[in-house]
Image: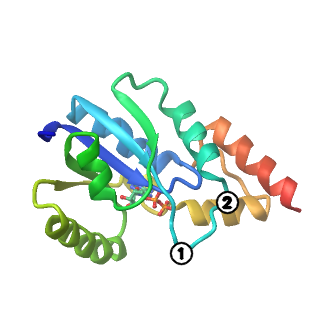
Amino acid sequence: MSLSNRIAVYTGVFDPVHRGHLDVIERGSRIFDHLVVGVGNNPEKISFFNIEERVRLVREVVAPFVNVKVQPFEGLAVQFVRAVGAGVMLRGLRTTSDMEYEFTMSLMNLKLDPGIETVFLMAKAEYSHLSSSLLRQIASFGGPLDEFLPPVIKEALERRVREQQ
Ligand code: ADP
């Protein structure tokens, strides 16, 4: 299949999706004709929400964006990107510590598939400290989440924490 630079793929674990991810999705949807959000697994970690739950939660919060689709994927991200016919992989960059990992990853992906380019968007200052793992920790201590999560995600996270206690 030929790859289109008008289609981008944004992959992540989204455990759960937060406002930092949503900001990248919204800005990406304005740059590209189509944006596919690929929800994957981290093979080294058991996720808090399973893949079906994570896909459903991402779908709920991206519903306002008409050119954004959400799909689960397994295996290498570049293979998924190629399978959907996209020529661009979209990534968000938070801090300088993200840089090293993302730089290595983008070079490896270019090696794995030279037909796919990685495009980075800098996280907005107000979201640059946000990560799903930090939000899970805040939730487990009953801390405030409204600033960081859309209401539907906040409720799902708080419900899951209660179920586990
Ligand atoms: P997390 O690190 O929050 O678990 P993911 O593995 O789901 O996130 O990350 C998917 C993509 O989203 C990566 O490109 C990551 O750098 C980006 N990202 C994560 N958090 C943010 C944020 N707060 N602002 C912008 N981009 C982010």
- Mark 1 or mark 2, whichever is nearer to me: 1
State which quadrant residue 92 falls in.
bottom left
Residue located at (47% from left, 55% from top): 40
User: Label 2 CB, ligand 1: below 8 Å?
Assistant: no
Residue located at (35% from left, 55% from top): 123
Amino acid type, label 1: Glu
Residue located at (24% from left, 76% from top): 104
Q: CA distance from mark 1 to mark 2?
A: 13 Å
Q: Nearer the viewer, residue 10 or 82?
A: 82
Residue 48 circle label: 2
Q: Secondary structure at mark 2?
A: loop
Q: Position of residue 25 (x, y in %)?
A: 37, 40
Q: Is residue 154 above or below residue 103?
A: above
Q: Nearer the viewer, residue 146 or 165?
A: 165
Q: Which residue is mark 1?
A: 44
Q: Nearer the viewer, residue 156 or 116?
A: 116
Q: Position of residue 32 (x, y in %)?
A: 21, 34
